Amino acid sequence: MQWWEWLLVSLAVVVVVYSVLVGWLVARGHREDARALATFIPDCIVLVSRLAREPRVPRRRKLLLVGLVAYLSLPFDLVPDFIPVAGQLDDVIIVALVLRHFVGAGGEPLMRELWPGPERSLGLVLRLAHRL
């Protein structure tokens, strides 16, 4: 298989797993949790784009965000995405380390201000950033 075929298969697997999890939450009656999970990744994308355009964010941190987006969009990673769980885990760790840098540099109030989603989801992002 070509690299782009692996990428498409990996994306399809992630979308299917994500959809099954959201559907399971809806079926169990946890509609609010399902909505938060369904919008979590789009909310993270909006947060990163808002931080990159925010004039109060120093240029060095904006370059870090651009580097993060570049790393996530490349077809190759430290651990290839076609390896189940580990392939996605390295992406999560890199994102958490970048967010930790932002939070550690005093950016938590700014992140709270720019977060588009539910407060509960932001709490998860901040806890992840503090733990690594």
Image (cartoon, rainbow, N blue to C red):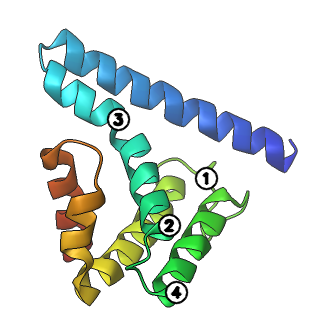
Q: Residues within 10 Å of mark 3 (few under 14, many from 20)?
A: some
**Which badge, 2 or 4, comes first in the chain's sequence?**
2
To which residue does mark 2 refer?
Answer: 53
The vertical placement of 70 against 33, above or below, is: below
Residue 81: give its label: 1
Looking at the picture, how far across and down is residue 53, in whole percent? 50, 67
Q: Amino acid at mark 1?
A: Asp
Residues at marks 1 and 2, CA–CA distance in whole angstroms:
29 Å
Residue at x 61%, y 37% (from the top left corner): 11
Earlier sequence position, callout 1 versus callout 3: 3
Residue 39, numbered label = 3
Spot occupied by residue 82 in the image (x, y as percentages of width and height): 63, 48
- Among the two numbered marks 4 and 3 on one chain, the one whose residue lies closer to the N terminus: 3
The residue singled out by tag 4 in the image is 59
Q: Of circles 1 and 3, which is in front?
A: 3
The three-letter amino acid code for the residue at tag 3 is Thr
The residue closer to the viewer here, 61 or 70, is 61
